[in-house]
Amino acid sequence: MKFLSFIYFLITNFRNFLYDKNIFKSVKSNSYVISVGNIITGGTGKTPIIIHIAKLLKSEGFKVGIITGGYRRKSAGLLVVHDEDYLLTTVEKAGDEAYLIAEKLRIPLLIHDKKYKALKELDSLFDVDIVLIDDGFQHRKIYRDLDIVIINDKTIKENNLIPSGLLREKKSNLSRANLLLYRDLKSHISDYKDIVNYHFTSTINTIRVTKDKAVVITAIANPSNFVKFLNENDASIQKVFTFKDHHFFTETEIESIISFCNNNIIKTIYTSEKDNVKLNKYNSRFSSQGIILTVIELEVLFNKSNEFKNYILSKINEKSN
């Protein structure tokens, strides 16, 4: 594994060198481009941050578009998920995260495995002021005006590149970032303290949590945090049905969960927003058994929310001026 990680290091290092020296060219958009990414595999909270920034920009009157790779989608090539008026595809074809973002924001969202091709299509089809790149830090084929990287506890602890570790590139490459966002952390990486940074926490909206007996269905990267939030808010969790991140639920799995609920007189199922876009099609089945599918929304809270907002807006204004 160490040898493979070394080979991976050589490849990524050489690739970054070619972009740094402008030997490999980046594609520029007509719009202001903001990348939101990370340097570690697994969930760091990119999706809620993408949604948060998009809402912030929309509230300021900007027209926003999003491009993503559509991770674990059951389709290939270019896909327009939302055209600002309608959802144009299914969750299976778009992937759960892309579909959730499009459903919540109702703005142009395009998918391509090669994100720069989605950017070109977005530029030609839609008139937007700002483009957000989901998981864009390693996608250097696209020129970005603002590079945001999310740091979590695993990022700080991990020292090995994949496949022996979780790092997608060496930590020193964080120097490319304009802004670091620390998730659920009080500390920061001392080597990069001079890079503008903010801290945020992720929590759940507890308004729909009750003390009734319930089960949890989850196929997210860090299900333990989701369950922990529920337990801390007096949810009475009898069982957690955990699946691999981005898993598409089958009828057999749903029937097994319903059977457990019926046998234990449970009428409440808690799930995340990301899981709900895949569970929606089973809603009538749950309802027929008197089971309520309760969607728990994730909230993003910044330590200095106004400063964060003003920083983003100031960077956009810098270019426009």
Image (cartoon, helix red, strand yellow):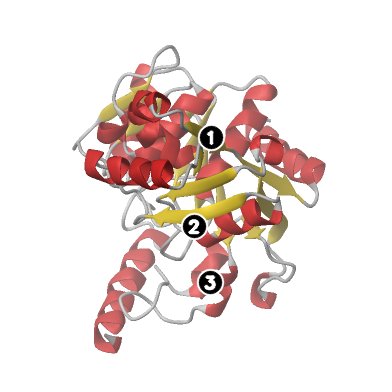
> Which label lies toward us, 2 or 1?
1
Depth order, front residue of 63/284? 284
In the rendered structure, the answer to whether residue 147 lies left or right of residue 166 reads: right
In the rendered structure, the answer to whether residue 150 lies left or right of residue 274 reads: right
Which numbered disc flags the more N-terminal residue, 3 or 2? 3
Q: Which of the 4 quarters of the picture holds residue 315?
A: top right
The amino acid marked with disc number 1 is Thr
The amino acid marked with disc number 3 is Lys
x and y percentages locating residue 23 in the rendered image: 32, 58
Which numbered disc flags the more N-terminal residue, 1 or 3? 3
The amino acid marked with disc number 2 is Pro
10 Å neighbourhood of mark 3: few (<14), some, or many (≥20)? some
What is the tally of numbered marks visible in this picture?
3
Q: Quadrant of the C terminus?
A: top right
10 Å neighbourhood of mark 2: few (<14), some, or many (≥20)? some
Q: Give the structural element (helix, strand or loop) at label 2.
A: helix
In the rendered structure, the answer to whether residue 317 lies left or right of residue 106 reads: right
Q: Quadrant of the N terminus?
A: bottom left
x and y percentages locating residue 75 in the rendered image: 19, 36
Q: Which residue is mark 3?
A: 154
Q: Cβ–Cβ below 8 Å for labels 3 and 2?
A: no
